[in-house]
Image (cartoon, grey):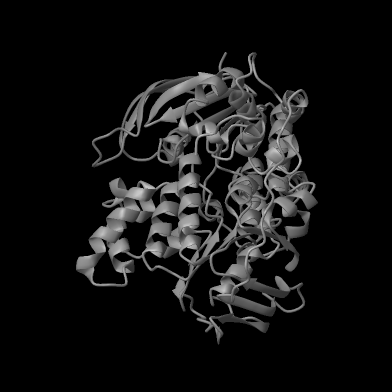
Amino acid sequence: MAFLTVEALSFTYPNKSAPALKNVGFTLEPGSLTLLLGATGSGKSTLLRLLKPELAPFGKQSGRIRYDGLPGDPTPGDVGFVQQDPNAGIVTDKVYAELAFAPENAGLTKNEVRLRVGETASYFGLRALFDRNVESLSGGEKQLLSLAAVAAADPKLLLLDEPTAMLDPIAAERFFDTLQRLRRELGLTVLLAEHRFAGIFQRADRVLALENGALTVNDDPAEAAKKLGKTALAGGLPAETRLWMGLGEPGPGPRSLSDGKALLQSRETAPLPQPTPEKAAAPLLTAKALTFYYAKNTPPAVDDVTLDIFPGRHLCILGENGAGKSTLLKLFAGLLPPFSGKVRFRDKDLKTYKRGSLYVNGVALLPQDPGALFLKDSVKADLLDAFPGKKDEAGAAIAALSDRFGITRLWDAHPLDLSGGEKQKCALVKLLLRSPAVLLLDEPTKGLDADGKRTLRETVGSLTAQGKAVVTVTHDVEFAADAADECAFLFRGQLLTRDAPRPFFAKNRFYVPAAGRLLPGALTVEEILTACGKEVAG
């Protein structure tokens, strides 16, 4: 008997003519892991919310949702839900209190709550964060806490909406391993929506894909890959799968990186292109011996960082959750006053705005929470408010950028009603309207599908071609390998290395794009296909 059955499910939001979901039907088997895919705004978050009755959105709904694997109607503890924005699910001020919240509300005794909290903290590796204030956590650490707090409620069905969007590659891999343990050891049934799905694709029992609210794929991973390879979602498939498709190999396709390496063993590959040294230019932004503490008697969040940001260059900064990456961007933007050291923009000391502004001194910051940029009741009103010139000149600029990012249809929507990926796009367009000399991006690919990442990469390339500088903090190694001119690694607030992408990733063992594991030194699958003599579309 299936754990959950969805039959002919359709849903339309109030004041919307087009349905968000159209006649969707599928089943979830007990203890299974099902991967839910789809472009930004395709209906994934809507579907997940409908499966948790307390979070179901208001609107016109038809069809049936049956929880055959439960003895009765689902209770709040039966269905766990991890949202795109970790701040939306956290309800207490301390890590240990957040872990205890669900068990306490379930009526467990004090000793039972202590055991559940301790076990959960150990399971998710949160021991070092146990006594911390939630506000002091990085975005990735908050997301890990949100996941652990839901697991502490002992759910039977776990719904996850892009849970690894703000996790570093190692933490994301550990999380996927934890999911496997949860289903294997506890029989947990999992439905997971992801844009960065390469690491979980082959581990899934079933793959579902939505397109404009309709279910277009409902297959095992091997069959799903064949169908997805002909869609815009192909870029998110595992590197070995994309290699197999690009080489036109017969058979069911590889199931691991080892299988992908085997595909290349009998083929001759041309040498990979090597970076050419860039002519030195005066930096736009300079950080000198930058140090910052959030509290006394704690390690520095940023520790003696000296860094030049050059015009016409895209620098990607990588590192684990809590390494100090977001803090460094806030110092660059003048949102935090350094404890020591200074930031200079065009040879002038950068002013610090203690109350904060996301656009100061010609430097613009896209924060981890793009909702912080929205001030008006509609997307278009926010964009008009951002345009620095005469309002009668704003129309063409707003229309051009909106068309590029596919947000024209969202103009009349309230910014807070948008999906995570839609918020990212709208916030980025708002900043681009200010035409900053230095654009700082904090996890800009979270919530974006493959097409959205391509648009972002092209936009960054256009900005650097104009002599502007872009600094991106990201856990998306594939994006960094494909889009960066330089990469840097931050650890415990210290800058350890900075180099062009190919030599940078060649030095690493863990922070490596999947293509580099198939062919040492490769940055993208497209590079490997070109080295194999295959023509790759631009």
Lateral position of residue 312 relative to residue 516, left or right: left
Quarter assignment of residue 108: top right
Q: In the figure, 136 relative to 424: above or below?
A: below
Name of the residue lying farthest toward the bottom: 348
Front position in the image: 111 or 251: 251
- Which residue is found at the position 68% from the left and 65% from the top? 324
Front position in the image: 413 or 58: 413
Lateral position of residue 320 relative to residue 406, left or right: right
- Which residue is found at the position 48% from the left and 27% from the top? 209
Lateral position of residue 527 relative to residue 65, left or right: right
Quarter assignment of residue 81: top right
Q: In the figure, 398 relative to 304: above or below?
A: above
Q: Is residue 68 visible?
A: no
Place of residue 291 in the rendered image (x, y in percent of width and height, measured from the top left): 70, 78
Front position in the image: 406 or 22: 406
Q: Is residue 432 visible?
A: yes
Place of residue 206 in the rendered image (x, y in percent of width and height, measured from the top left): 58, 22
Front position in the image: 474 or 71: 474
Place of residue 151 in the rendered image (x, y in percent of width and height, measured from the top left): 65, 41
The quadrant in which the N terminus is found is top right
Place of residue 333 in the rendered image (x, y in percent of width and height, measured from the top left): 53, 73
